[in-house]
């Protein structure tokens, strides 16, 4: 009896346990053992921690536990890399094996996604670091080869996302081909890591920006189906809602604003603000924007206070600048010309001050439309003179400059029409993510 009392879990016993398939009853006994016995917990504590965190269920493998530990350790590695420049972080990763971990590859991909809301260049850097880590991993660190292929598809997908939001669509397309290749190599395992819906959603966003709308909608249907598969407890309504937001964006690009509005309203109650407060802001702001563009300014204005509050709570200045821009459009729709000019000039100056010249150009075109409506031809001509040299200096692609040149020529000759302003604005919005798009003069 006394010998049994002093027998505890060892690494050798744990290795033997994982080498065979165990029943749920035996797994529960192991969990109980590490929960009540400090000596056993010293050996199998990671199992208990993973179970309490919801990372594993009652039945689990050694790989499940190892992935949990690596994901926890990644937070410490990230604290070391975070303050470093891209070049310095890359050197640290390449110097040895300390920073070559599964958890860090995943975390860098996630951090890239977060950075993309405010710093697209940083998003590309972080996703590139994630690719570097994942491609340096070998089989059984800690998973078999097919799992590793799926990880590489995952990090390449986040590089796709980073390039896309940076408006580098060709680079995004190259990265997408890499993501597709790695997923094909690993897909014999099925979606064992739960990456597929996210990878598919990122690909859909790229196809949307490329004008391949039907393909984008088909991919989003697939992602939504994955999130809603199974019983209610296993469904992820929040991410299904996020997929609806992406569908709304596709319908917007297709010019179907009513359908886009319907999708946003369908998505709104599914979003968990604790998981992604910014997504809730995007939904509310886009509803406001769609209502304004559909000629319903009073309905739109009802959303302004909540959008402002959400923007202030998140503390992102760009959100407030975009709200000012939208408020300028609402003032114009309500025939409040002076207020519209004041708000649009403010947004234009803020974008210009941040060297966000493409956004400044789009605001300038909205401002030109207001001036045109007010009969202020001199201000319209002055605006046209200012715009083109700025964008020539910023190396905006040739077709966009050609569109701006047409706008300038018409303004200087006092032949500018609301239709031309609208066409140039619509072209610049679409050409932002599709530089090869031609402007029909």
Image: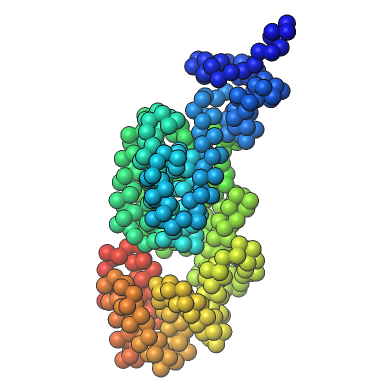
> Which image quadrant for residue 44?
top right
Residue 258 visible here: no
Give how far across and how far down residue 304 sits, in percent: 61, 70
Front residue of 175/123: it is 123
Front residue of 198/221: it is 198
Q: Residue at x 66, y 13 (%)?
A: 7
Q: Residue at x 69, y 9 (%)?
A: 4
Residue 370 visible here: yes
Please state, as top left, top right, bottom left or bottom right, where the N terminus lies in the image: top right
Front residue of 88/416: it is 88
Q: How many marks?
A: 0
Q: Residue furthest bottom?
A: 378
Q: Residue furthest front?
A: 95
Q: Residue at x 37, y 33 (%)?
A: 138
Asked if 62 appears above or below 357 in the picture, the reply is above
Give how far across and how far down residue 173 sits, in percent: 31, 52
Answer left or right for 163 relative to 11: left
Give how far across and how far down residue 373 sits, in percent: 46, 86
Q: Residue at x 43, y 91 (%)?
A: 379
Answer left or right for 28 relative to 285: right
> Which image quadrant for residue 302?
bottom right
């Amino acid at each position: 009896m006394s010998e049994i009392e002093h027998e505890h879990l060892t690494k050798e016993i744990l290795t033997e346990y994982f080498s065979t398939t165990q029943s749920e009853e035996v797994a529960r006994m192991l969990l109980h053992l590490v929960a009540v016995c400090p000596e056993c917990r010293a050996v199998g504590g990671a199992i208990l921690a993973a179970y309490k965190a919801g990372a594993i269920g009652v039945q689990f493998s050694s790989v499940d536990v190892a992935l949990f530990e690596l994901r926890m350790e990644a937070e410490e590695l990230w604290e070391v890399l975070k303050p470093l420049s891209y070049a310095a972080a890359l050197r640290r990763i390449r110097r040895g094996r300390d920073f070559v971990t599964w958890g860090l590859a995943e975390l860098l991909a996630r951090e890239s996604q977060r950075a993309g809301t405010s710093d697209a260049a940083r998003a590309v850097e972080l996703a590139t670091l994630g690719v570097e880590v994942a491609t340096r991993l070998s089989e059984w660190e800690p998973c078999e080869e097919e799992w590793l292929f799926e990880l590489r598809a995952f990090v390449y997908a986040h590089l796709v996302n980073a390039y896309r939001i940076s408006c580098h669509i060709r680079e995004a397309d190259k990265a997408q081909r890499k993501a597709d290749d790695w997923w094909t190599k690993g897909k014999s395992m099925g979606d064992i890591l739960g990456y597929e819906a996210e990878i598919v959603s990122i690909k859909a966003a790229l196809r949307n920006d490329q004008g391949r709308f039907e393909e984008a909608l088909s991919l989003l249907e697939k992602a939504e189906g994955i999130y809603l598969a199974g019983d209610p407890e296993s469904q992820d309504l929040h991410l299904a809602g996020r997929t609806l937001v992406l569908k709304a964006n596709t319908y917007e690009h297709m010019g179907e604003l009513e359908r886009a509005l319907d999708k946003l309203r369908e998505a709104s109650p599914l979003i968990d603000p604790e998981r992604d407060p910014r997504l809730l802001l995007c939904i509310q702001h886009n509803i406001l924007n769609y209502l304004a563009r559909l000629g319903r300014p009073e309905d739109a204005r009802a959303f302004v206070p909540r959008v402002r509050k959400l923007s202030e709570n998140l503390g992102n200045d760009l959100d407030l600048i975009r709200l000012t821009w939208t408020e300028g459009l609402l003032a114009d729709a309500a025939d409040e010309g002076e207020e519209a000019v004041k708000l649009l000039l403010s947004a234009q100056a803020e974008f210009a001050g941040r060297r966000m010249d493409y956004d400044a150009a789009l605001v300038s075109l909205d401002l030109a439309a207001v001036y045109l409506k007010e009969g202020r031809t001199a201000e319209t001509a002055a605006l046209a003179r200012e715009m083109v040299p700025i964008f020539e200096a910023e190396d905006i692609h040739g077709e966009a400059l050609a569109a701006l040149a047409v706008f300038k020529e018409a303004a200087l000759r006092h032949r500018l029409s609301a239709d031309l302003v609208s066409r140039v604005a619509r072209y610049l919005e679409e050409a932002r993510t599709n530089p090869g798009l031609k402007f029909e003069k």
